[in-house]
Image: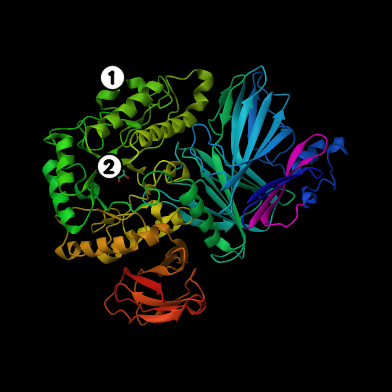
């Protein structure tokens, strides 16, 4: 890992273990151009890639074609309005209503370590682990300074970027767009991968050809969303899981975003990522700054597996924090699908008693324990224990659960307010709404205006007060509707465009305060399932509920898409009852357990009422979790086959660091008659080691055999065709000697 500045060439070279990123300063006017991002370069002699020696040349040599220069120069951080007609990263409006900006070089600084970003989640590392370039540029006409921050890490091939804009002039101006990262490069006939979905269908992988013009994915819903994901990858046509070039970006942010690729008239690609500019307008008074969130970039020529590995390593080591960062999580049982709103102390204790006998370690009380919340149409905001349901009070319940040797967890949806709530009756102006217009309800609720300090303090005290009142060791922080009717009673007219971002900042502030006051707390974020599964939330909670769809077969695609970027340790995954509540499918209990093992693992069912043959399997599943969770949580993940693509079976693998142990999960969806065993090529093993291969389950499992890692990776392993639909096999590989 290294960042160096070549004074004579005026270029910067940023090296990660296997990649180089170069940028340079051009000409007496100080434009900052992108030079190269790709395989690691030995030398820094690539400034010619900015093409300033060919027509239209730099303005200093051909000022009559200044506009042509702006429209093709590979800007490191492009601004709009002066002649670059491609999509810009930064747009402003001056006090007089004018747009147009151009940033040019002022100074730079290279230092060890990585500064925190004020008010925002961001990756981190020590002075030994990472190095940062701060590039300062200015638009003197506007009185605007931009600080572009780049950090490289010594243990993973990523570069993180962020931007801070400061008003260094006398007059206020408005930021109407501030992206966080951009790469201008040559078009290489790319494909584009993005993640799409819906409620209960989150993060399905889509790959398509990148054509001319603008192609983007975005969210304008106030959160990262079920529908699109703050991630974009450009890859060569021949790129596969195992080989080929990939450029990818992911956004450490939980609100509106846009991830975009634009192919220009000159076959250049501009790949960019940042806060969605729609309805964004941030006023900067003289001396004020705006810190844009962090974007993570990675490049590899070794296929999607290597891209995934880079993200996983970064997030495991340099983003997730706290007590549970590297720890096994308690196996929980959540009462949502078990009871919905129909529960009381006795019901919860009956579940806990049975669960504790089976080895389950924590009871999580979901929605419905507060105010008059007996359905999902009221009481959000009234965070007072409903003692009619919880007879004896919350502390009594928690103590009783603790006496069983179990931990206790609780559900909140702190950002919300029901129109039918005491809170709304007392403070109707606390909801986000356009004054005078009846706001749109969703799940019969409104969103709290977290741009107001009083509201944030109320929310914090409501949550913290409950946590202080009993021994609560886990919180599920939910958010069940997206934002509409953007209006705040607390902001002046010229700051209404700040509401979306101020909202996200307040969520971060709340969760930051929470994990500070309750450092032992296991926080799990959630948003109507997995609508806020993003790196921003991972900074506060080491796990996020992946989807309300707990069906083992639906989960294959959801978990595949999620694991494309995020470590398995972050994916909230539970075994639920059948017929499945979302799709009505019946799958074997064993398969449900094996699929949930790829995530945090837990239960979401009424353990007192499930069939006896299912209940009997729980202690075995608990033992399986304890045996393999270290490997699943800490091991390297490889995608072997995708049911979404082959429509037959899914297969993934984890391997520990010294490659002495691996776990392969194989899920056959529909059985096909008269088929032979399937041969799969394993990955990530030590070619020189010999592995004992053991099927951990199945009726007629083959005898353990010993094969070399080399053979298993090149020639493959035979998986006998399982009998029946929705069958899963867990295969354990242990190196001999
Ligand atoms: C959301 C969550 C569920 C559950 C309900 C409760 O949908 O994703 O797991 O907590 O809210 O209302």
Q: In which quarter of the image is residue 401?
A: top left
Q: Give the colour scheme of this rendering.
A: rainbow
Q: Quadrant of residue 369?
A: top left
Magenta-highlighted residues: 18-44
Left or right relative to 586: residue 38: right
- Residue assigned mark 1: 426
* Sequence-first disc among 2 and 1: 1
Residue visible at 49% across and 52% down in the picture? 195
Instruction: Judge: label 1 CB < 8 Å from ligand 1.
Output: no
Where disc 1 sits, the SS reads: helix
Magenta segment main secondary structure: strand
Percent position (x, y) of residue 512?
A: 41, 34
Percent position (x, y) of residue 60?
A: 86, 36
Of 619 and 195, the residue lying toward us: 619
Q: In which quarter of the image is ligand 1?
A: top left
Q: Residues within 10 Å of mark 2 (few under 14, many from 20)?
A: some
Left or right relative to 108: residue 289: left
Residue visible at 49% across and 17% down in the picture? 492
Residue visible at 43% across and 78% down in the picture? 717
Where disc 2 sits, the SS reads: loop
* Comparing labels 2 and 1, the label whose residue is closer to the camera: 2
Residue 19 lies within the magenta run = yes
Quadrant of the image for the C terminus? bottom left
Of 580 and 113, the residue lying toward us: 113
- Residue assigned mark 2: 473
Left or right relative to 340: residue 319: right
Q: How crowded is mark 1: few (under 14 residues within 10 Å), some or many (20 or more)?
A: few
Residue 275 lies within the magenta run = no
| Residue 344 seen in the figure | no
Residue visible at 33% across and 36% down in the picture? 518
Of 702 and 630, the residue lying toward us: 630
Q: In this view, does 25 lie above or below 138?
A: below
């Amino acid at each position: 890992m290294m960042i160096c500045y070549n004074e004579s060439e005026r270029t910067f070279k940023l090296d990660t273990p296997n990649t180089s990123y170069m940028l340079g300063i051009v000409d007496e006017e100080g434009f900052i151009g992108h030079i190269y991002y790709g395989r690691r370069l030995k030398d820094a002699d690539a400034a010619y890639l900015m093409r300033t020696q060919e027509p239209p040349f730099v303005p200093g040599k051909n000022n009559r074609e200044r506009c042509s220069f702006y429209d093709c120069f590979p800007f490191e951080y492009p601004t709009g309005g002066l002649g670059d007609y491609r999509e810009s990263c930064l747009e402003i409006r001056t006090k007089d209503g004018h747009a147009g900006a151009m940033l040019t070089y002022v100074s730079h600084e290279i230092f060890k370590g990585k500064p925190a970003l004020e008010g925002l989640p961001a990756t981190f590392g020590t002075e030994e682990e990472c190095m940062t370039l701060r590039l300062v540029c200015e638009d003197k006409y506007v009185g605007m300074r931009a600080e572009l921050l780049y950090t490289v890490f010594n243990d993973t091939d990523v570069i993180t970027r962020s931007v801070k804009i400061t008003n260094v002039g006398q007059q206020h101006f408005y930021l109407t767009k501030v992206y966080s990262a951009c790469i201008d490069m040559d078009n290489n006939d790319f494909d584009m991968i993005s993640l799409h979905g819906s409620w209960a269908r989150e993060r399905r992988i889509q790959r398509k050809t990148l054509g001319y013009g603008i192609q983007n994915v975005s969210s304008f819903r106030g959160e990262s969303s079920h529908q699109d994901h703050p991630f974009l990858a450009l890859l060569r046509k021949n790129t596969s899981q195992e080989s080929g070039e990939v450029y990818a970006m992911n956004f450490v942010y939980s609100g509106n975003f846009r991830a975009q690729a634009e192919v220009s008239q000159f076959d250049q690609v501009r790949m960019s990522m940042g806060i969605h500019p729609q309805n964004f307008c941030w006023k900067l008074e003289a001396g004020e700054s705006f810190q844009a969130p962090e974007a993570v970039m990675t490049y590899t020529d070794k296929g999607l597996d290597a891209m995934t590995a880079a993200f996983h390593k970064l997030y495991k080591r340099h983003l997730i924090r706290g007590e549970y960062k590297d720890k096994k999580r308690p196996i929980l049982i959540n009462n949502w699908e078990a009871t919905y709103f129909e529960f009381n102390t006795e019901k919860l204790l009956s579940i806990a008693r049975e669960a504790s006998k089976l080895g389950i370690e924590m009871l999580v009380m979901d929605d419905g324990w507060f105010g008059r919340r007996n359905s999902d149409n009221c009481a959000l905001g009234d965070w007072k224990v409903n003692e009619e349901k919880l007879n004896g009070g919350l502390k009594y319940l928690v103590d009783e659960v603790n006496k069983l040797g179990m931990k206790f967890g609780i559900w909140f949806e702190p950002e919300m307010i029901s129109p039918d709530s005491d809170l709304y009756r007392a403070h109707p102006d606390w909801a986000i709404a356009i004054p005078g217009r009846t706001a749109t309800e969703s799940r019969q609720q409104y969103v709290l205006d977290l741009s107001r300090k009083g509201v944030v303090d109320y929310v914090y005290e409501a949550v913290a007060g409950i946590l202080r009142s009993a021994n609560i060791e886990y919180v599920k922080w939910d958010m069940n509707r997206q934002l509409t009717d953007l209006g705040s009673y607390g902001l002046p007219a010229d700051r209404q465009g700040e509401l979306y971002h101020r909202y996200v900042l307040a969520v971060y502030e709340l969760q930051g305060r929470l994990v500070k006051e309750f450092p032992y707390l296991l926080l799990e974020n959630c948003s109507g399932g997995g609508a806020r599964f993003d790196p921003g939330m991972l900074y506060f909670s080491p796990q996020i509920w992946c989807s309300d769809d707990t069906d083992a077969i639906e989960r294959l695609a959801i978990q595949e898409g999620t694991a494309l970027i995020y470590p398995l340790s972050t994916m909230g995954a539970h075994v639920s009852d059948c017929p499945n509540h979302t799709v009505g499918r019946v799958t074997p209990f064993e398969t449900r357990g094996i699929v949930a093992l790829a995530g945090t693992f837990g239960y979401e069912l009424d353990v007192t009422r499930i069939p006896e043959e299912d209940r009997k399997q729980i202690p075995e599943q608990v033992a399986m979790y304890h045996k393999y969770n270290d490997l699943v949580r800490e091991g390297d993940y490889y995608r072997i086959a995708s049911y979404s693509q082959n429509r037959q079976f899914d297969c993934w693998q984890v391997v520990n660091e010294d490659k002495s142990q691996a776990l392969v999960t194989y899920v056959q969806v529909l059985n096909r008659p008269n088929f032979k065993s399937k041969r799969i090529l394993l990955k990530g093993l030590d070619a020189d080691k010999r592995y004992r291969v053991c099927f951990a389950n199945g009726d007629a499992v083959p005898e353990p055999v010993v094969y070399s890692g080399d053979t298993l990776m090149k020639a493959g392993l035979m998986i006998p065709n399982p009998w029946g639909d929705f069958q899963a096999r867990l295969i354990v590989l242990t190196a001999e000697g």
